[in-house]
Amino acid sequence: MFIGGFPVSGYYIFIGKIVILFFLIIVLFILFALALGIYTVRSRKIVFPTFVLFMLYLFYSPVKWVFDLFSMNDLLVDEILIEIQNAVNLEKFKKRTERKVVLLPQCLRNSECRARCDPLYGFVCIKCGRCDIGTIMDEAEKREFKVFVVPGSSFVKKIFKEYRPTSCIGVACPVELSESMQKTTVVPSQGVYLINNGCFETKVDVGDIISKMELVSPIPCESGTPRATTLYDFEDDGGLS
Ligand code: SF4
């Protein structure tokens, strides 16, 4: 029996070869995207960001599975995605000067926190000093950022609907942050991931959050010059401009 001039067995072998070739090309593309992503995180030089974001978001679960298989830290994938999203959003983020928000996860709170939870805007911090949220609020007020301590993603939706922020600094664990930054494309955002996982009394680098705020609202330090912030260098804009 023949299909398209090929014997049936030859036809299936041909299809099999095409599938294997396609699979190998995909694997090579993913490895290339990962290599570019690691280069980006280490050197802070951005190369083909659109390609890296597309490949790592599209093949997110298989890539993480392979990391797990080889007992590698799969959070590296999320950190790459966050760093590249930060770089891609940077210029738009710097131009937004109204209704800027910082969204903090409620797990940053101390276990003895007495803040009440507003049904619309989340926890209302009273700056008791038991966790870093009070410090972040003080720094945010100086730079005209509004801070929300959110108990969950439903609150984020409510805040976006009611407060209508024009830019956002999001703090979360790497997995949640990389996912939410993919969804929040309308509002330019900067992500800062938590130092420790566990959803309980978590920690964040407060200096990182202040650096992000300084990108928009720099406050001169004692020497009179704005605080230095880490920026990115686009070696190739990947069609962003
Ligand atoms: S500083 Fe604010 S959020 Fe932190 S424990 Fe005190 S009231 Fe709660």
Image (cartoon, rainbow, N blue to C red):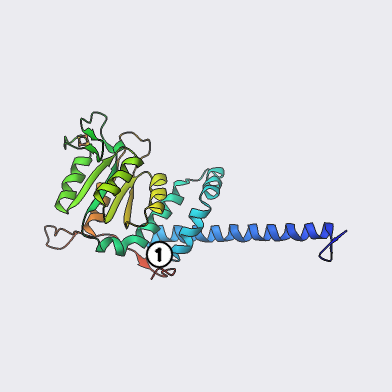
Say what secondary structure mark 1 lies in.
strand
> Circle 1 is placed at which residue position?
46
Q: Quadrant of the N terminus?
A: bottom right
Residue drawn 21% across the image and 60% down it:
97
* Side of 115 relative to 25 (left or right): left
Q: Which sits in the foreground, 7 or 90?
A: 7
Residue drawn 25% across the image and 59% down it:
229
Image quarter for residue 4? bottom right
Measured along the vertical axis of the image, is residue 128 above or below residue 169?
above
Image quarter for residue 188? bottom left
Few, some or many residues within 10 Å of mark 1 (<14, 14–19, 20+):
many
Q: Quadrant of the C terminus?
A: bottom left
Residue drawn 18% across the image and 59% down it:
218
Number of numbered discs visible in the structure rendering: 1
* Side of 27 relative to 138 (left or right): right
Position of residue 101 measured from the top left corner of the image (x, y, whole percent): 24, 50
Asked if residue 207 shows in the view, the reply is: no
Position of residue 178 measured from the top left corner of the image (x, y, whole percent): 41, 50
Position of residue 51 measured from the top left corner of the image (x, y, whole percent): 48, 63
* Side of 77 relative to 124 (left or right): right
Position of residue 34 measured from the top left corner of the image (x, y, whole percent): 50, 57
Work out which residue is located at the far right of the displayed protein and give it.
Answer: 1
Asked if residue 219 shows in the view, the reply is: yes
